[in-house]
Amino acid sequence: MTVQQGGVGGAPPAAPVVRAGAETATKVKAVDTRKATSPLRRILFFVGLFIATVIFVFPFVWLLSASLKTQAGVFSNDLFTFPLQFENYTRVFEIAPVASWFFNSVVVGLLAAATVTVSSAIVAFGFAYFRFPFRNALFGLVLASMMLPGAVTLIPNFLIWNALGQVNSPIFAPLWAGNLFASAFYIFLLRQFFLGLPREVFEAARVDGASYPRMFWSIAMPLTRAALIVVFVFELKASWTDLMRPLIFMKDIALFTLPRGLQDLVVRFHPQAGGEGQFHLVMAASVIVTIPMIIVFFLAQRHFIEGIATTGSKG
């Protein structure tokens, strides 16, 4: 039997060797192509990221520049005009009790965020851990409450707080006390997170004699710290930027929060209300309102991103 016939002991056919070499060359070429396109993709990615960053940052940059302009040039097309008017910030504190407004916003924001975080976590832990009849139906009713527009409850809330004598209250009860009864949205977030915790941990704690409150405070809360920070930051931001409730319940200028005070400045300086159009001072006050939330998100970003990434991973 000849070599060409592929007999036993003969040399292997040439064709497979050629095909193997062609496949190897194709793989090498593909690797080279990926190496060649990888820098291009990276450049395009960073260019897109830069454009998106500029789009999101530009409104704040414009606000900052407008707060450092004169009254005549506040709406000019120039981004920054020199000399910069840093005295706008000192004038804001002179013409309005901005320091008191800032303190009021801090107090209301911390109380609102702390109360809704704890109360929502307690309810969410109950839905996640305990097994009881009609649990899912009851949870569905909680979620259904989110479908109710907030405007529907404004008048009943006002009547309740007015009957309790808390309208224009120095303890700001209408602005945060309602959070003692939890929030449906935060209950949903935290329940999904609690469902991702190993149930065996809680069963072992029960065997060791731990009570349900002890399991909640010593096991569930530490293991869900990232999700709790997410809820805290969400509610702190919502309370910090809330205008409707302070507009309804707070009448004394000394009890205004920052959004309510900012609205008062806009009305006071608007030409239609007899003002002189001092919108450069309004811009300076707006910067004072905005910067604290930027700092909060910067400090909590690691926990914030972790909580967003893991919340709802199970359930």
Image (spheres, helix red, strand yellow):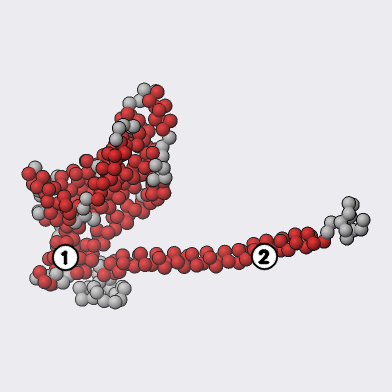
Three-letter amino acid code of the residue under disc 1: Val
Based on the displayed image, in which of its 4 quarters is residue 165 positioned?
top left
Q: How many marks on residues?
A: 2
Three-letter amino acid code of the residue under disc 2: Lys
Q: Please state the horizontal and vertical placement of residue 13, each as a whole percent of the image.
A: 83, 59
Q: Mark 2 or 1, which is nearer the eye?
A: 2
Q: Please state the horizontal and vertical placement of residue 209, each as a whole percent of the image.
A: 36, 22
Is residue 7 found left or right of 40 in the rendered image?
A: right
Based on the displayed image, in which of its 4 quarters is residue 206 positioned?
top left
| Front one among 202 and 251 | 202
Q: Is residue 165 visible?
A: no
Against 142, residue 8 (above or below) is below
Q: Looking at the rendering, in which quadrant would you find the C terminus?
A: top left
Circle 2 is placed at which residue position? 29
Do the residues bearing badges 2 and 1 touch, measured as CB atoms within 8 Å? no
The residue at 29%/35% (across/down) is: 134
The residue at 20%/52% (across/down) is: 150
Going from the N terminus, do you reach mark 2 or mark 1 first?
A: 2
| Front one among 234 and 299 | 234
- Distance CA(mark 2)–CA(mark 1): 65 Å
Against 202, residue 298 (above or below) is below
- Label 2's element? helix
Circle 1 is placed at which residue position? 266
The residue at 72%/60% (across/down) is: 24
Q: Looking at the rendering, in which quadrant would you find the N terminus?
A: bottom right
* The residue positioned farthest toward the right in the image shown: 1
Bin the neighbour count of mark 2 within 10 Å (Cα to Cα): few under 14, some 14-19, many 20 and up.
few
Is residue 151 found left or right of 82 in the rendered image?
A: left
Is residue 6 found left or right of 268 in the rendered image?
A: right
- Label 1's element? helix
